[in-house]
Each structure stands twice: as C-alpha cells, then as structure tokens.
Image (spheres, coloured by chain):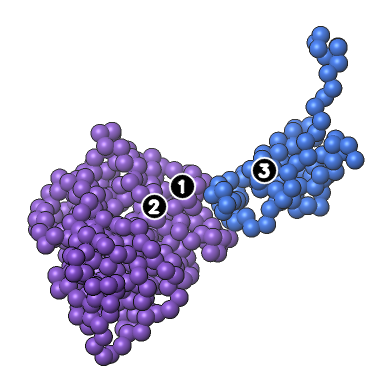
Chain colours: A purple, B blue
Amino acid sequence: MGSKGILLFMGKPHPPNLAPRTQARPTGTTAERVEVREGCSASVHDIRLCRAALGFSFSVASGDEHFGQAAQLMFADLAPAMQPAHAFIVALGVDGSYSVQADGAPAVDYLARGEVLGTLVWLVNQGVTENPGDLLLFHAAAVAAGEVGVLVPAPSGSGKSTLAGGLVASGLCYLSDEVGALDTAAMRALAYPKPLSLATGSLVALCDLGLQVQPDVSGWMSSEYQLPSAAIRLGSVVGSCPVGLVLFPELALGRQSVLDRLRPSEALGRLVVNTFNLADQPDKHLQACAELCRTAESYRLVIGDLATACSLVLSLLGVSAPGDALLAAEAR
Amino acid sequence: MSEAGAAATFRPKACAGLAQAELDGDLAVYDLHAQELLVLNRSARAIWSCCDGTGTVPEIVADIVEVFGAEPETVRCQVTELVADWSRRGLLECPVPEAPAPERTPAADAG
C-alpha cells in the first residue's frame, strides 16, 4: 500500500428537520437567487453538482466556493445525474452560520462550518434510505475482493466503517459505507460510494495501518471525519459484486481479534435487525436475507485491533497479505 | 364455557403479517413489530403449519402423531409448550386461554 496524503473533511451529522420530499424542486436554467432564511441566500448556479446515489438523485448548490469544492470531492465517486429529482441548497448567512434547504423547504439552520458537510452527507443518506426502490438496504458497509462481495452489517459504533476503510487500504475495492444495497434479483451488492464516516479513533486506527493523514485545514471539521474513498486509495470503487461473505463486526479494542463462523440461522438473526426496509416487502426481503445467509459464509468478527482484524478477513478471502489484494485490484 | 373448556377448544392461528422464509429446511418467522426472529426446525415448523385457526390443540397433536408416528404424550407436551410460547410472543392472533389452576386438596397439600 503506497502512503499518500489524505484530504479530510469533518462534519458532525446534525438532526435535520427535513420535510417529506414529495416535490422535486425545479432546476431552472435562469440564474436564481434563493433566500434560504433571512440574511442567508445562495444562487442555485453558484456551485452545483448533480449526483445519483442508488435510487436517490440530487443536486447541491452553494454560494460558498470552498464548500462547493469540498462537496465535489465528497461525492466524486457517485454517478452523475442528468435530471436530479431532489435539490439541496447550502447557503452562508451574514452571521457566518450555514443553512441547508432541501427541495425548497428548510432542512437545517444555523450550522457551524464544521457541521455542514456531515449534515449534507447525512441528508443524502436519508434520501437514499427513503427511496430504496426494489433494493434491500442494510445498515452496513460493503467492500469486494475480486468477485467476492463482503457485506459488513452492524449498528453504529461497531466498527464497520473502520473495517471497510482498513480493508480498502489493504487493497480491497470499495462499495459503500453506512448503507449496503442488495439487488435481491441478482443477489449482488451495489455500489453507493459515499464518503466513509469515521470517528477520530477510527481515523487514528487507519493511520496506524500506514496511511499518512494530512488534515485539510479548510475548516470543515467537527467531531466526525468524512473520508472520500479516493483519499484511502485512488480507483478503489467497484460497481457491483455478488455477496460471498457477511461479517458482523464487534468493536472491542484491546481484546483479541477473533473470527467465529456463524450458522445460517444465527447470521439471519443478526442480519434482519440491520435492514432499513425489510417491512417494505417482508416475505421477499426476508427470503433474500435467508438466501444470503444460506449462500454466503457468515462470521462474527471481534475487532480488537484493526490490523489483525483486517489480516483475518484477508486470510478468509485467500489474500495472504495486503500487498496481494492491492496487486489483484490493480490487475483488474 | 369453562376456562378449561375454552383452552380445549382454542384453535391457534398465526398472526397475519409475519414475514416467513425457508432456510435449509427450517422456517424463519420474523415479527416486524417486535423485530424478533424465530427459526423453527422441521418438527416445530410442522406444528406451526397446523396453526391456521382450523384445528384445536388436541387435533393438532393427533395430526402430528399421525404424520410423525411419535409418542402422543411427548407430542402433546411439545405442541402445548410451543403454542404457549408463540402465544406469549404475540405470534398468534388470540392468546391461549389460561387453564384454571388445579384445585388444592388436603391430600395434595400433604403430598
């Protein structure tokens, strides 16, 4: 793994007051200045990006050039969208605080600079989980080793993003963080390459794997890092992959890192509680979960330290060393 | 009808809206409200499939005995226990009526 500088952006997710997005905001072609709140406005053409994230397409406009550049970096791995169905406007007020408008309605006001990027990522994530289409969505990270997709479902704080970051740093390909999407017809995990959301401790653990972190000082910092996959390893994103391995991480720093094989019934019990939308199509989605547990190997992974946990997973995948995974990824 | 009579004529019926899926011959039943998953092995699955609101517990016992050729008292205990468990978990449309506690007699007390 080559050491490289990592551009970091931080932002603490903020509970938004997000109105139901039943109407797409018109994306006009004429310059339009939008007042998000009193003394806080932006032109929808100032800085704009249009991206598709699974079933959720969106645009982001902001009058703040630096924020616009940061947002471009954050969502660089998402596919472009021609006609985004949803629109976010991020505006800087005269008091120095930020406001976010979603589809023409106020979403979050009075954000500090360090909160606004994380909030935008959070809002996009929320949009993705509210618009699943026919996909089954898990609270999970996902990576891939060749044609073996690795789903990492777990509640917050279990180490799934950290593990995903460590595995990508070790040469595996990146599919998603926070939301793992399964195409139940093809039983393939789909890419949703949002930035990895990492707590400070997770970032330190990634640095311990050899990454050289150069925190960007543009000020988008709070208590949670938003780390684009390209900052870990350029070109690490892959399109989709059949799931061959399901890992249920448990963060237990200082303990021994261990892998325990789970029976399909045990895995199913852990998997279903980490779904976002099983209730949308209960029988179909439960059958997909059961199929996943029947066809993929499932393990409980105690993460005592990241390096050992990654080594255990790489061994399981038949990758003897991080360098092998990287070479395989580069060969692809 | 007495409570004992109500228990004898109770016809267990699985709640509608439970998600179900096959898992290597077992049956996974997921209660979306309680977010609880039960994986029923083959014999439990057979009893579960009888809980369609048409048969009483004694009738279900008779069906299982006939199909599996098992010892009736063993089957009766298992069926009663499982139906009571599913009832407690809220997986049946109506709870199992409670049978009255056996009356205490001097002989039993002396027991």
In the rendering, which numbered label is found on residue B59? none
Q: Mark 1 and 2 residues: CB-CB less than 8 Å, in contact? A: yes
| Spatial separation of the CA atoms under disc 2 and disc 3 | 28 Å
Output the chain of dot 2: A
Task: Provide the residue designation for mark 1.
Answer: A270
Q: Amino acid at mark 3?
A: Trp
Chain for disc number 3: B
Point out the image quarter for the C terminus of chain A: bottom left
- To which residue does mark 2 refer? A153
The chain identifier of the residue carrying mark 1 reads A
Say if labels 2 and 3 share a chain: no
- Residue A94, placed above or below residue B50: below
Q: Secondary structure at mark 2?
A: strand
Residue positioned 43% across, 61% down in the render: A137
Instruction: Name the residue rendered at 17%, 46% in the picture.
Output: A204
Residue at (41%, 48%) from the top-left corner? A298
Disc 3: which residue = B86
